[in-house]
Image (cartoon, rainbow, N blue to C red):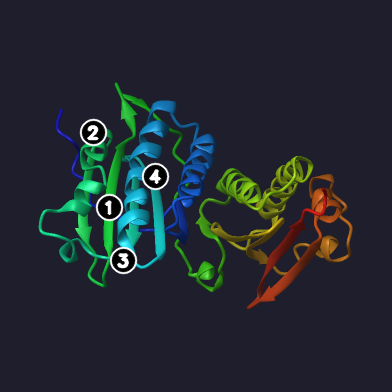
Amino acid sequence: MESPTVTPTVGAAAPTVSLELESRPETLTLVRGMLAGVAELLAMDPELLDDLKTAVSEACNNVALHAYPDGVGPLAVLLSSNGDGIQVLVRDQGLGMTEVAASGDRVQGVGVPVIRALTERAEFRPRAGGGTEVWMLFAGQRDGKPLFRLPMDAAPDDGWCKQMTGDAVVSVSPVMLLGGVLGRLSRALAANARFSLDRFSDVYLVTDAIAAHAAKAAAGDRIGFAITAGRRRLELCVGPLRRASGGELEAGACAEESCSPLTVLSDELELIPDNGTEALRVVMIDRRQ
């Protein structure tokens, strides 16, 4: 059967999930965690998830190995979901395809046969401003049956996350996707930060509470977060939220049980005003031996 004709719009259109991070080999864990979080909330077919993880990992690993010869650099993964399937765009700002050897070593390093075997369609192209992007389309149906539950349309990206920095900066829409993605990335970074087993378990409770709070307090249909990890320290910043949406958090107590882990398990907790909205900042420190 002939593959459908699809215009590669992910990145131009509003992405369901946008993940920005540094092109280190260990960041593949974060990329795969993001995909798993989306897959869980979309009730994605396990085989489709395996294809996504394998192909996207190939593209991201190529960036980590080849895009920045002198070190690390920006890596972006944008995922969109619609009736045609799942579209993923992997971008870097490093060496473009025209800047590598004529033999095309870098393109082959992407694992082109693997990516083409696992996707309905894939394109490899240099970016006008420098760097390379790999666009992939994964089929949304098999034998006439859908392979994932289609979410609501993604809200436009208003650029709120551009002011955020961290080991991972993420924008998701709809807001219901926040919990799965935030939880997995936070736990991956907590493991890298050498959190003890007990404190690691606290990360589950805190990220679940943040997602529950954001579901009620989000300022719109898109929400972003940044995570920064240090030695036995994790900092999360989530927004934009409606102003005065979390007065009980500022007071140091939460009237709703779903919010209590934030006040009980956070070492620092604050709501930061930002142009008519606010951001929730949470710091977790592991002082346990």
**Residue placed most toward the observer, 190 or 144:** 190
Residue 58 visible in the shown view: yes
Q: Earlier in the sequence, mark 3 or mark 2?
A: 3
- Amino acid type at circle 4 is Ser
Crowding at dot 1, Cα within 10 Å, few <14 / some 14-19 / many 20+, comes out as: many
* Proximity of marks 1 and 4: CB atoms separated by less than 8 Å: no
* Proximity of marks 3 and 2: CB atoms separated by less than 8 Å: no
- Amino acid type at circle 3 is Gly
* Quarter occupied by residue 226: bottom right
Q: If the image is split into quadrants, where does the N terminus sit?
A: top left
**Residue placed most toward the observer, 153 or 180:** 180
* Proximity of marks 2 and 1: CB atoms separated by less than 8 Å: no
**Residue placed most toward the observer, 99 or 216:** 99
Image coordinates of residue 138 in percent, x first then y, are: 31, 38
In front: label 3 or label 1: 3
Left or right side of 48 for 9: left
Left or right side of 85 for 172: right
Q: Earlier in the sequence, mark 2 or mark 1?
A: 2
Query: Residue 94 bears which disc, if any?
Result: 3
Kind of element beneath mark 1: strand
Q: Residue at x 34, y 54 (%)?
A: 65
Kind of element beneath mark 3: loop
Q: Residue at x 74, y 61 (%)?
A: 283
Q: For mark 1, what is the residue?
A: 134
Kind of element beneath mark 4: strand
Q: For mark 2, what is the residue?
A: 117
Residue 12 visible in the shown view: no
Q: For mark 4, what is the residue?
A: 81
